[in-house]
């Protein structure tokens, strides 16, 4: 299952979902039908059916959470050290500008902790700890709004590809009924 921010479930959310499965187990023991359980718990009927099968084979213990898919590679204390390193800025780590990229953070993690992450893994790690994309705090002083407006009105229409139009001979999904 994929999650919107790519970080998996928090411990609190995992416990909440396990609680829903416990309530479902109690309802299974009473003999309630799956559609009623699904409606009351606001989950899919398929999930209830899967839970019922697990419950039948292994009892309530079968509905327990298995925990995190994998333990985090960086401990909380290591992540605090990483935060301190990031606070120093990219120039302190040898980059020519003050811009953090996922690749640079990945390199710092490798150098400091001798742990290997993918770029997407770094992204998930940072999002899980409340980081977000860097957004400039202010607009550039050099920004010329009139030049931008002129470019959008004059240059962009020349660059933009023309839109395809469906004609009788084109490979459109709809075709004329009579020819």
Image (tube, rainbow, N blue to C red):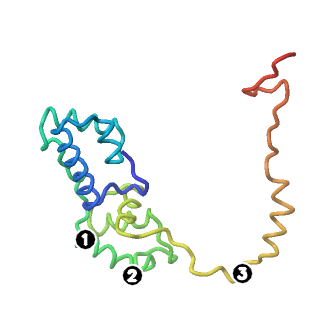
**Dot 2 crowding, Cα within 10 Å, few <14, some 14–19, many 20+:** few
The location of residue 137, given as percent across then percent down, is 57, 80
Question: Rounded to the nearest whole Å, what is the CA distance between mark 2 and mark 3?
Answer: 27 Å
Looking at the rendered structure, the secondary structure element under dot 3 is loop
Query: Which is more toward the observer, 104 or 76?
Result: 76
- Choose mark 1 or mark 2, whichever is in front: 1
Mark 3 or mark 1: which comes first in sequence?
1
Residue drawn at the location 33% of the way across and 36% of the way down: 35
In space, the residues marked 1 and 2 are separated at their CA atoms by 16 Å
Residue farthest along the top direction in this orientation: 179
> Of the residues under marks 2 and 3, which one precedes in the sequence?
2
Residue highlighted by disc 1:
78
**Which secondary structure, mark 1?**
helix
- Crowding at dot 1, Cα within 10 Å, few <14 / some 14-19 / many 20+, comes out as some
Work out whether residue 149 or residue 97 is closer to the camera in this orientation and state it. Answer: 149
List the single residue furthest toward the bottom. 141
Label for residue 88? Answer: 2
Question: Callout 2: helix, strand or loop?
Answer: helix
30 up-or-down from 137: above or below: above
- CB-based contact (under 8 Å), mark 2 and mark 3: no
The vertical placement of 169 against 62, above or below, is: above
- Distance from disc 3 to disc 1, alpha carbons, whole Å, reads 40 Å
* Residue at image mark 3: 142
Compare marks 1 and 2 and give the one earlier in the sequence. 1
92 lies above or below 113: below
User: How many marks overall?
Assistant: 3
Q: Residue at x 80, y 43 (%)?
A: 163
Q: Position of residue 112 (x, y in %)?
A: 29, 69
Q: Position of residue 159 (x, y in %)?
A: 81, 53
Instruction: Give coordinates of residue 51: x percent, y percent.
Output: 24, 38
The image quadrant of residue 178 is top right
Q: Do labels 3 and 1 touch, CB within 8 Å?
A: no
């Amino acid at each position: 299952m994929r999650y919107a921010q790519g970080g998996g479930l928090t411990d609190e959310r995992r416990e909440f979902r396990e609680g829903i499965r416990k309530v479902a187990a109690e309802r299974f023991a009473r003999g309630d039908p799956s559609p009623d359980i699904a409606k009351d718990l606001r989950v899919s009927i398929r999930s209830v059916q899967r839970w019922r099968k697990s419950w039948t084979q292994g009892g309530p213990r079968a509905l327990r959470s298995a925990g995190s898919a994998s333990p985090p590679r960086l401990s909380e204390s290591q992540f605090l050290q990483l935060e301190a390193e990031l606070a120093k800025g990219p120039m302190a780590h040898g980059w020519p500008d003050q811009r953090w990229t996922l690749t640079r953070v990945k390199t710092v993690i490798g150098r400091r902790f001798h742990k290997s992450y993918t770029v997407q893994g770094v992204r998930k790690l940072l999002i899980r700890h409340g980081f977000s994309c860097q957004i400039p705090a202010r607009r550039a002083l050099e920004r010329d709004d009139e030049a931008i407006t002129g470019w959008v009105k004059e240059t962009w229409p020349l660059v933009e590809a023309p839109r395809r139009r469906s004609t009788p001979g084109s490979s459109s999904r709809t075709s004329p009924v009579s020819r």
